[in-house]
Amino acid sequence: MAILVLISVISLQFFFSETDVSPIIRPQWSKEGDDHSLAKAIPLDCSQLFLYLPRDISNNGICSQLQNYILAFHVAATFHRTLIVWDPIIEPTARPVFGCSPDSEHHSTGLSQILDVPSSRRHTCASVLCPFNHSEWTRLLSSSTNDFFNLTCHGASVMVSGGRRLRRQYLQRLHETSQQKNYTQWISSIGGVTLTQIQWFQQIQEQQQDDDPWLGVAALLAPHIQWQPFLQPLIAHHLQAFHLPQSYTALHIRRGDKLKREAAAMVRKYWASRGESDPRNHSNYIPLEAYVAQLDPGKDPSHVYIATDDPVTIRDEIKQLKATPWTFHLLADRRLQSGHMNTEPDCHVRYNMTIDAMVDLEVMIRAQVFVGELNSNWGRFIHTKRTEFDSTKAVLRDFRIVSGDNHTLYLGQ
């Protein structure tokens, strides 16, 4: 039977108009159990969907993929749409983004290799999607002149985006729109939101307090970003092998390709603050000592675990530190594989690299004290996962910036 598909390519500006955002149906709260999760009060709506298409090649790294998923979750909530992540079935010629799992039961080429996502393979609303394969979905998106497009499938409105298209529009559009700043109109769509949290956002809107609302958004999103259950025992096994102390400090030092673009301004600012303006007189990166300078001897945990893409130089810098009270541990020394997954041709080796990265991220996230930056996706992802709501407001567990970063960027770019 022929399927009639009405495709309507709509400008991004339309998506961000006030008329496109349907008013959310408010649940009726009783005085008893006021602080219960509102997730059960919001029914699953299969008539308004947001289909997210992750990139199908691993040329942007694991945290780039993770950050884009966070943005997709955010976009879906903003427009009160049910999120579905397109999860293509693995083919013999496919190159899985995160490598080839030795577990034959978990075959995927996409995000569901590592994250517990609302996959198109098993989602309740997936049956109303148009019967397109992976190539057809990606071709539809790539042929559009807009970063978002809308189509109608079986009577359902399906908003589609993914990859760089979602990413490049995030800050300049979504982050600044008036409906975004009206938090109480959309945050319930994230799921698991309590009345106390709604009231916290309401107080910010009414200028009764000056807390950072985007920290609250991060705290609401963080619990929804979880590794696949079948991977969690493997990650726990690797963490146990580290023999981590109960309290420890973590540093994330990203150099590599970031030094040419995202980190360049931060590096210049750091050296300028030390009276060095001529790049010929200093290194093109921020040295380890600047990260260590953020620590408080005698107060912060003395065992320091370092995740870095420049372990050779970091080892030399550790040796040059004088009379330091810190005991340093390079996570690179514990890796299953060396190198970078984007350039590794062997699918099984690339999978080991993925596991290494996930373990490193967990070490950073669980640390009592973290020092890093926000110009990398690693830093932003760690920031999000270190946020949470206490009994009354959103809090960020000890997260220190090495130099010159802007805290408003932790959800975007």
Image (spheres, grey):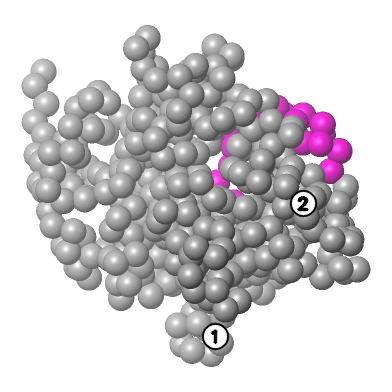
Residue shown at the point (80%, 50%) measured from the top left: 319
Foreground pick, 224 / 326: 326
Residue at mark 1: 210
From the top left corner, tell me how far across and down residue 144 is, in percent: 13, 44
* Residue 65 within the segment the image draws in magenta: no
**Looking at the image, residue 280 lies above or below residue 248:** below
User: Can residue 108 be seen?
Assistant: no
User: In which quadrant of the rendered image does the N terminus lie?
Assistant: top left
Foreground pick, 150 / 93: 93
Could you say whether the residue bearing mark 2 is in a helix, strand or loop?
Answer: helix
Amino acid carrying mark 2 in the image: Ile
Give the residues in magenta.
Answer: 223-244
Amino acid carrying mark 1 in the image: Asp
Foreground pick, 101 / 292: 292
Which mark is on residue 318?
2
Marks 1 and 2 sit apart, C-alpha to C-alpha, by 40 Å
Residue shown at the point (30%, 55%) measured from the top left: 168
**Looking at the image, residue 155 lies above or below residue 18:** above
Instruction: Spot the residue most to the front.
Output: 280
Q: Examine the image and state in which quarter residue 387 appears.
A: bottom right
From the top left corner, tell me how far across and down residue 174 is, in percent: 31, 64
Q: Earlier in the sequence, mark 1 or mark 2?
A: 1
Horizontal side of residue 372 vs 128, given as left or right: right
Foreground pick, 31 / 312: 312
